[in-house]
Image (tube, rainbow, N blue to C red):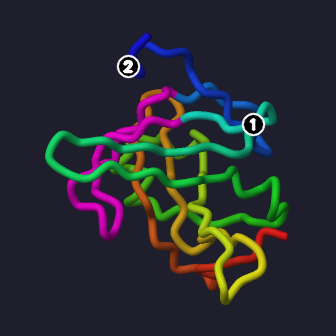
Amino acid sequence: MSALHAAPVTVVTPSGPFAVPPVLRAETALPGLPDHHEWTLAPLDETGVLFTLRSEPADARPVRLFVVEPHAFFPDYAPRVPAEARAALGLAPDETPVLLVVVHPADDDRAHPSANLLAPLVVHPADGRARQVVLEDDLPLRAPLA
């Protein structure tokens, strides 16, 4: 089964589980990845919290990112998604987006992986349109996942 016809991916959020299309289409490229606009979302666990995002365009190197639903690790995370970002994704004022944050692996400087809470990936759960939004909130770029 191709990713275009694959079953939706369940993302568990504080608002409940969302069935998200398995292919996300970035409205604007993620920083540093200008050729990557289509991403396949795949679960890595049964809880609906940990996922991979893969992009494999024909004319660029493949990329795999790890993302998490942030509230599982940061229960008080409540970013304000700007109205212009919501509008660009076609989200109505009363619609709840799915938020995913990119995880940075542990390395020599950090004992634990960290999450980018400053720039979540905001996803329209109905159609998979997505964009990474740099928030104006005072949030960490590398919040430890411990």
Camera-side residue: 133 or 116? Answer: 116
Camera-side residue: 124 or 68? Answer: 68
Q: Quadrant of the C terminus?
A: bottom right
Q: Which residue is mark 1?
A: 45
Q: Residues within 10 Å of mark 2 (few under 14, many from 20)?
A: few
Q: Residue at x 21, y 54 (%)?
A: 35
Q: Magenta stretch: residue 86 in it?
A: no
Q: Which residue is mark 2?
A: 4
Q: Residue at x 81, y 35 (%)?
A: 47
x then y, percent, for residue 52: 56, 44
x then y, percent, for residue 15: 76, 40
Q: Residues within 10 Å of mark 1 (few under 14, many from 20)?
A: few
Q: What main secondary structure does the magenta stretch of the protein show?
A: loop
x then y, percent, for residue 18: 66, 30
Indicate left or right for 47 with 137 as reference: right
Q: Assign a secondary structure to mark 1.
A: loop
Q: Which tag is nearer the camera, tag 1 or tag 2?
A: 1
Q: Magenta stretch: residue 22 in it?
A: yes
Three-letter amino acid code at disc 1? Asp
Q: Assign a secondary structure to mark 2.
A: helix
Camera-side residue: 145 or 25? Answer: 145
Q: Does residue 110 sit above or below 54 in this rendering?
A: below
Disc 1 + disc 2, Cβ < 8 Å: no
Q: Does residue 71 sit above or below 54 in this rendering?
A: below
Three-letter amino acid code at disc 2? Leu
Q: Which residues are magenta?
A: 21-41
Marks 1 and 2 sit apart, C-alpha to C-alpha, by: 21 Å
x then y, percent, for residue 59: 14, 47
Q: Does residue 130 sit above or below 18 in this rendering?
A: below
Camera-side residue: 104 or 91? Answer: 104
